Image (spheres, grey):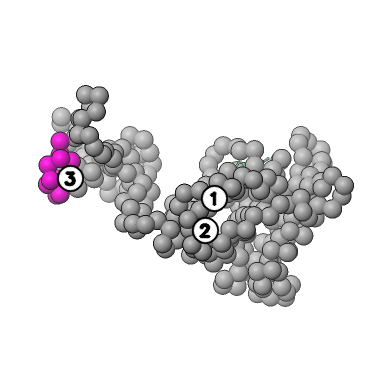
Amino acid sequence: MRIDVVSIFPGYFDALELSLLGKAKQRGLIDVRVHDLRDAAHDKHRTVDDTPTGGGAGMVMKPEPWGEMLDGILAEAGNSAGAAADAEPGAAGDPLIIFPSPAGEVFTQRMARELAHEQHLVFGCGRYEGIDQRVFDEYAARGRVRLVSIGDYVLNGGEVATIAMIEAIGRLLPGVVGNPESLVEESHEEDGLLEYPSYTKPAEWRDRAVPPVLLSGNHAAIESWRREQRIERTRRVRPELLPRELRGESRGRHAAE
Ligand code: SAM
């Protein structure tokens, strides 16, 4: 997968050199290219923002640097959106441009799985009050654009949101995580339940014992205990995630205890 990132703080993305994603980069599984938006700002101060038209607080990112930078990336990638104005918008294999935004659709594990099938993602990191709306409109008219939020809170910029998305998507790419089975058992995967609590050795630590069932060697009992834990944890922490068919399961048992 190729990933281009545009930001006025390229240094944020040094974090992608670490750990599993860093190794995936070294092994050529992910090709991440980070671009400094200011390289497309040509005045003395390399200005990328201006006051909001119509008034209001803060500054808005100017469309011209974004246009130059994104045109360059799309043209270099040799795709229809960048190469020709009359090309079919959204043709298969075209880059998908993602603008992190608190006003976007919410990023989920399901979306991560969907995006892991893309060949080329471009992330445009906003700062200040965000990016001039015409940038979104321009590239949505020429190809595929999504505004994506990583949660209902406001960050200072799109960099941290982009890193979160790249990590969630990247670890789903074949070969990035050593044991693919570990991806299946996680929270938000498969049946949407949260993961069960995990333990390792020693069997007792500071008078806290590992639940005896995990030491029993009885795989059916362990599986059943873990499922129960998943349901209970989901019910307690994120009841809205509990599938309808599970809403009655295990509650009766606990009520009787
Ligand atoms: N004025 C914008 C609004 O109210 O929607 C918020 C701008 S925010 C201060 C600056 C940038 O941070 C945004 O353009 C976006 O790139 C990023 N950002 C902030 N919160 C985010 C979130 N929850 N998810 C994704 N990106 C976010």
Image height of 19 relative to 94, above or below: above
Image height of 70 relative to 106, above or below: below
Q: Residue furthest top?
A: 207
Q: CA distance from mark 1 to mark 2?
A: 8 Å
Q: Secondary structure at mark 2?
A: helix
Q: CA distance from mark 3 to mark 2?
A: 37 Å
**Contact? badges 1 and 2 (CB < 8 Å):** yes
Instruction: State which region is magenta.
Output: 212-221
Give coordinates of residue 135: x percent, y percent: 73, 56
The residue under the point 81% across, 46% down is: 47
Q: Amino acid at mark 1?
A: Leu
* Residue 184 visible: no
Give coordinates of residue 113: x percent, y percent: 45, 58
- Res 222 label: 3
Q: Main secondary structure of the magenta part?
A: helix
Which residue, given by chain and number where applicable, does mark 2 sit on?
25
Which residue, given by chain and number where applicable, does mark 1 sit on?
16
Q: Amino acid at mark 2?
A: Lys
Query: What is the quadrant of residue 157 in the picture?
Result: top right
Which one is nearer the viewer's eye here, 46 or 168? 46
Give coordinates of residue 43: x percent, y percent: 87, 50
Give coordinates of residue 217: x percent, y percent: 12, 46
Image height of 57 relative to 207, above or below: below
Can residue 214 be found in the magenta stretch?
yes
- Side of 83 relative to 104 (left or right): right
Ligand number 1: quarter of image:
top right
Q: Amino acid at mark 3?
A: Ile
